[in-house]
Amino acid sequence: MSISELDRFTPSDTVLIVDDEEAVLESLEVLLEKDFRVLKAQSGEKALALIRENNVQVVILDVMMPGMGGMAALNCIMSFPDHPEVIILSAADSARMGVQAVKNGAFDYIAKPFDTEEFLEVTRKALEKKRMRREIDFLRSEVFKLGGFGNIVGRSKPMEKVLKIISRVCQTDSNILITGESGTGKELVARTIHSRGIRSKGPFISVNCAAIPRELLESEFFGHERGAFTGAHERRIGKFELAHGGILFLDELSTLHIDLQAKLLRVLQEKEFTRVGGDRNILADAQVISATNQDLKELIRKGKFREDLYFRLNVLPIELPPLRERPQDIPALVHFILEKITHRLNRPRVEITKDALELLKRYHWPGNIRELENLLERLVAFSSGEGAIDVPDLPNELIFPDVESHIPGSSNPSRGLNSARDQFERMYILSVLRKVGWNQTEAAKILGVHRNTLIRKLALLGLGGRKI
């Protein structure tokens, strides 16, 4: 690659050259000054001062220098919040040190004497990576400002409380326990904490504790060495090792077998583990976020969950409210989910009527947000693409959510004759409206009442007064 190919980079892009040899500084400056703003330093200490005072995108760093060496300077540079990309210069006989520098965070290393074209190519790629990092950080901040917490939708009082807790725990490294009914979005909260937290640059490794056979749990968590057991034909890296520097998410924690609970507790206490069949200790540097829809305190009383493990995992608790306790969030959730579904299915935008939304708000949603998503996806899939989703499109259990409470022998207590009569009227009127395509005039004729009477009855029964 020639220097002319770097024309799209602006002179404001700053490259800092750090080398104790003046001749090297001057030769690299000549190579870069046409296309970049070039700064020079002959020591690691001076380089750090220049980075603090200037908007440096790329650092060309000699690994062998008196005083603060290149490796020490690299470690300091990588600790800066918005650190520049670092390219290490190393002699041919110190290539191993260059490889170690890359492991410590350097973008790349180049052995002296180097090829000019190769040097410019590596510099270009380092600058591109730096720009990409800044663009991603900017987009994340914009999403945060626009949506608060990305895919977490809701501004009801219960959700305001949850969002405040999330914003606080994002700045910590302690273990987190998320509780709530099935379908309330526990994994979504965990992923949000990861994307906004101090470990966002690390991996997010999810483990469904209920989906792993008991005999494979230890290997799944901690990995195994080749030959550790029958069928272990090669080394396997476990979830804890994969999550190094990031977050390990343990879903359905309550299903974790009691034997593995003891081993997990030991890892959390000692911050290290060994692979199955191995003898080498491996550092466990992962924040653990757990989730469960069970009452762990009740499981502790029954001897099915370790109390000491519970306290290790429940340092920062987050309890998610069920959807029935936040009905005011349902309209925003519905519109958000419909937008997502239609985009995924490549369908035209689908609207929903106020009457249908009102019924969705009144439903008790035993399956919470997951049930709402499944319903909306079914409605979109079955829709013709003409008109909005309306009451006749909804399933009976949403239109008549209290019908079981009026049936003798039902698990729900009856609320009396008047309530049962209202429910019957509601069901009967809705069945007639369905048959006539929701034409109120035709329905009134079949019912033997005036149309205005029907409209008033619809309002009294909470079915709205939609005019045709």
Image: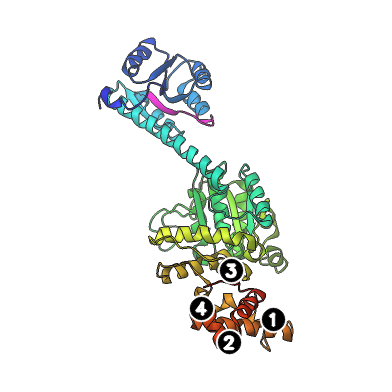
* Depth check, front residue: 22 or 391: 391
Helix, strand or loop at mark 4:
loop
* Depth check, front residue: 138 or 95: 138
How far apart marks 1 and 3 lie (CA) works out to 21 Å
Which residue has dot 1 on it?
412
* Depth check, front residue: 426 or 75: 426
**Residue 62, numbered circle:** none
Q: Residue at x 51, y 31 (%)?
A: 82
Label 4 is placed on what type of residue? Asn
Label 1 is placed on what type of residue? Asn
Judge depth for marks 3 and 4 and give the one in front: 4
* Depth check, front residue: 378 or 221: 378
Sequence-first tag of 2 and 3:
3
How far apart marks 1 and 4 lie (CA) works out to 34 Å
Which residue has dot 4 on it?
439
- State whether residue 414 appears in this view: no
Judge depth for marks 2 and 1 and give the one in front: 2
Query: What is the span of residues highlighted in magenta in the rendered image?
Result: 78-89
How far apart marks 2 and 1 lie (CA) works out to 30 Å
How far apart marks 2 and 3 lie (CA) works out to 26 Å
Which residue has dot 3 on it?
360
Which residue has dot 2 on it?
447
How crowded pointer 4 is (Cα within 10 Å; few <14, some 14-19, many 20+) is rated as some
